[in-house]
């Protein structure tokens, strides 16, 4: 029995007393130092970014070059880099140095119709202007305008808030008096208005925003009717 006891004690000591792995210790130390270094650099970078001086913003007033009495209603940059500014008295084209002004001339039927709601560039690079008196297309070669009158005159006078171009070349116009579709091939408009007797008509005539999806469907935001959807090729909302 004493011999067995000695053997048991010796076996326990051999199992309980483990040799220290110094290489593992060294590896863990290197990992700790690396993590501490990364954290230190993160804090230093954050402090540097916060401490970096912010360049002041400077604004240039373009009122001297434009009509000071004009209220700006729309601004776009076309694919050539020109800025087009729609105003209550016409439009301006800015090339970075000079302005060219286009205004209505009552005795000239190929001048800009007048009060501008929206300036839009279609997929072909054509500039369109939605005005109080209808739609106008700019001819860049002659700097003249081709006019197109809405089917419902009241739609034009109530303003156009947005224009989108479909894959057929047509233009969808959001107005306060209904949704308009302009067919460039025949130069005619098709109007969509709310009809209480037709449950699949547009919810209300006051159209605020438009968006085309990848399937060619049109999403229509109306007030206060909510959101409508018109599938491609359909006339039911």
Image (cartoon, rainbow, N blue to C red):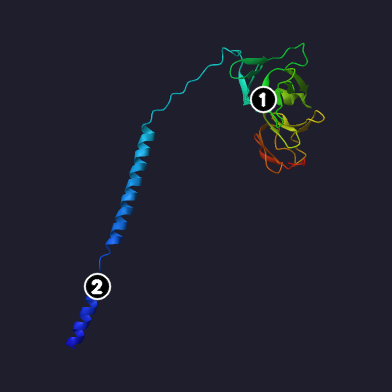
- Residue 51: image x %, image y %? 36, 32
Extreme residue toward the right, this view:
186
Q: Who's the residue at 28% across and 64% down the image? A: 21
The furthest residue to the left = 2
Q: Which residue is mark 2?
A: 16
Q: Quadrant of the C terminus?
A: top right
Instruction: Please state which of residues 150 and 7 is positioned toward the viewer in this rendering.
Output: 7
Q: Residue at x 33, y 43 (%)?
A: 40
Front: mark 1 or 2: 2
Q: Position of residue 214 (x, y in %)?
A: 68, 43
Q: Residues within 10 Å of mark 1 (few under 14, many from 20)?
A: many
SS class, disc 1? strand
**Residue at the image point whose x is 21% and y is 86% from the top:** 4
Q: Is there a contact, CB below 8 Å, between mark 1 and mark 2? A: no
Please tell me which of labels 1 and 2 falls first in the chain: 2
Marking on residue 119: 1
The one nearer the camera, 177 or 235, is 235
What is the quadrant of residue 106 in the picture?
top right
């Amino acid at each position: 029995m004493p011999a067995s006891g000695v053997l048991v004690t010796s076996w326990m000591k051999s199992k309980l007393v483990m040799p220290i792995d110094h290489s593992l210790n060294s590896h863990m130390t290197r990992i700790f130092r690396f993590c501490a270094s990364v954290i230190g650099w993160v804090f230093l970078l954050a402090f540097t970014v916060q401490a970096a001086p912010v360049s002041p913003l400077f604004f240039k007033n373009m009122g001297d070059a434009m009509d000071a009495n004009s209220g700006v209603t729309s601004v776009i940059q076309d694919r050539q880099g020109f800025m087009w500014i729609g105003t209550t008295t016409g439009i301006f084209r800015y090339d970075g140095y000079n302005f060219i002004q286009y205004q209505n001339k009552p005795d000239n039927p190929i001048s800009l119709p007048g009060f501008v709601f929206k300036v839009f560039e279609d997929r072909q690079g054509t500039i369109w202007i939605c005005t109080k008196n209808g739609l106008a297309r700019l001819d860049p070669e002659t700097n003249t305008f081709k006019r197109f009158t809405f089917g419902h005159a009241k739609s034009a006078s109530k303003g156009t808030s947005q224009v989108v171009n479909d894959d057929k070349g047509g233009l969808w116009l959001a107005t306060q008096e209904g949704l308009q579709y302009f067919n460039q091939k025949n130069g005619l408009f098709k109007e969509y208005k709310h009809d209480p007797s037709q449950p699949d008509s547009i919810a209300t005539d006051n159209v605020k925003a438009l968006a085309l999806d990848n399937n060619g469907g049109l999403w229509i935001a109306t007030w206060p009717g909510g959101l409508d959807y018109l599938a491609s090729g359909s006339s039911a909302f």
